[in-house]
């Protein structure tokens, strides 16, 4: 896959994650992780899972796409939407 099309695909992914549906999905995922973690809070991994659930919630609220920079796309959702013309 040519590098240029890879970057366009990464920008589209970041822009999709910056939509209200993408942001909501991250928040719901975070809440599910917290719920699962609290259900297993007696075990050591339960607290870890609950703490990790804060990451997608924070990313959704702040409109960040944390995987974006790993793919060569911007961190901020507003910039990703501008690049894709949304």
Image: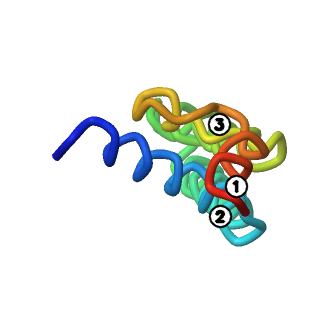
Question: At numbered mark 1, what does the secondary structure look like: helix, strand or loop?
Answer: loop
Pinpoint residue 7: horizontal percent, then vertical percent: 40, 40
Q: Which residue is mark 1?
A: 18
Q: Which residue is under mark 3?
A: 55
| Mark 3 burial class by Cα count in 10 Å: few <14, some 14-19, many 20+ | some
Q: Using the numbered discs, state the Cα–Cα distance from disc 3 to disc 1 in whole angstroms.
A: 15 Å
Q: Position of residue 51 (x, y in %)?
A: 63, 33
Residue at x-position 44% and y-position 48%: 8
From mark 2 to mark 1, how far is it between C-alphas? 6 Å
Mark closer to the chain start, 3 or 1: 1
Mark 3: secondary structure:
helix
**Residue at x-position 57% and y-position 49%:** 14
Q: CA distance from mark 3 to mark 2?
A: 14 Å
Instruction: Answer whether labels 2 and 1 touch (C-beta < 8 Å).
Output: yes
Asked whether residue 35 is in view, the answer is: no
- Residue tagged 2: 22
């Amino acid at each position: 896959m040519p590098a240029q099309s890879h970057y366009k695909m990464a920008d589209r992914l970041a822009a999709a994650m910056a939509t209200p549906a993408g942001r909501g999905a991250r928040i719901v995922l975070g809440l599910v992780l917290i719920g699962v973690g609290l259900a297993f809070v007696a075990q050591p991994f339960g607290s870890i899972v609950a703490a990790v659930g804060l990451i997608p919630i924070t990313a959704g609220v702040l409109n960040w796409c944390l995987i974006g920079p790993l793919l060569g796309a911007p961190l901020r959702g507003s910039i990703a939407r501008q690049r894709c013309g949304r």
